[in-house]
Amino acid sequence: EMMQVIEEEAARLNRLVGQAMEMAALDAHDIKLDMQLHSMREAVDLALEAVQTQIQTHPVDIRLPDSLPPVEMDLESIGKVLQHLLENAAKYSAAGNPIFISAETSKNRLVTSVADRGAGIDDFERMMIFDKFYRGQGQRYRVQGTGMGLAIAKAIVEAHGGSIEATSQPLQGSVFSFSLPLPVGALQSV
């Protein structure tokens, strides 16, 4: 039993140090993005593979139209953004509640969303959830985490020239959406 606790705590500490290093590199603009055209489905598949264990008790409903244009992105980094959003959706909603992944084009951007049916976020907390080390007041003792995932996701999306936001209703769930600029002419070819 003691060995299992030690292993879990060592893994948690390793995750915290890794995320702190990643955040430091992002803050220093010391990352090199491998920008290439990819479909959002590729990033979603990458993220789903990485979070299989965390989301295993949640049905995942993917709504990505085949007509979506490819977008210029660092596939691994955007996969990591989706990974953080999926992990949070699983952590903050009860087992059995679905997680929805969708994408659409809007105003020369590809907007990708991850929605859950969890506890939701009040308006005050929504202003702070993308801050480093911030964890929700009502959930910080119930849900494990470092408070770095959303800050990392925001930094990655902004490094791509995009933006990220959350909408939520308490007890109804949350929707985290990030937008990435579409290549010039992408909408005309759809």
Image: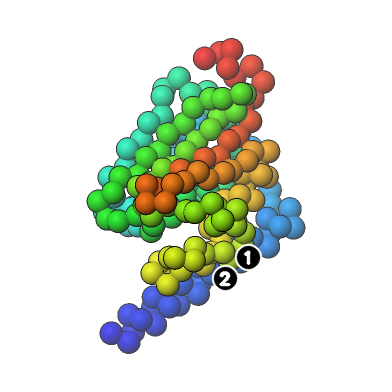
What SS does tag 2 mark?
helix
Q: Is residue 119 left or right of residue 176?
A: left
| Labelled disc at residue 40 | none
The percent coordinates of residue 183 (x first, y second) are: 64, 24
What SS does tag 1 mark?
helix
Q: Is residue 53 left or right of residue 176?
A: left
Establish if 50 lies above or below 61. Answer: below
**Residue at coordinates 42% horizontally, 51% vertically from top-left?**
170
Q: Is residue 179 left or right of residue 3?
A: right
The percent coordinates of residue 184 (x first, y second) are: 67, 20
Establish if 178 lies above or below 2. Answer: above
Q: What residue is pinned by disc 1?
A: 21
The percent coordinates of residue 56 (x first, y second) are: 28, 53
| Circle 1 Cα neighbour tier, 10 Å, few/some/many (<14 / 14–19 / ≥20) | few
Between 81 and 74, the one lying in front of the other is 81
**Residue at coordinates 49% horizontally, 27% vertically from top-left?**
104
Q: What residue is pinned by disc 2?
A: 17
| Position of the N terminus by quadrant | bottom left
Check whether the beta carbons of the residues at disc 2 and disc 1 lie within 8 A of each other. yes
Would residue 49 be seen by someone viewing this image from the given angle?
A: no
Would residue 41 be seen by someone viewing this image from the given angle?
A: yes
Count of labels in the image: 2
The percent coordinates of residue 85 (x first, y second) are: 47, 50
Q: Amino acid at mark 2?
A: Val
**Residue at coordinates 32% horizontally, 80% vertically from top-left?**
4
**Residue at coordinates 42% horizontally, 72% vertically from top-left?**
141
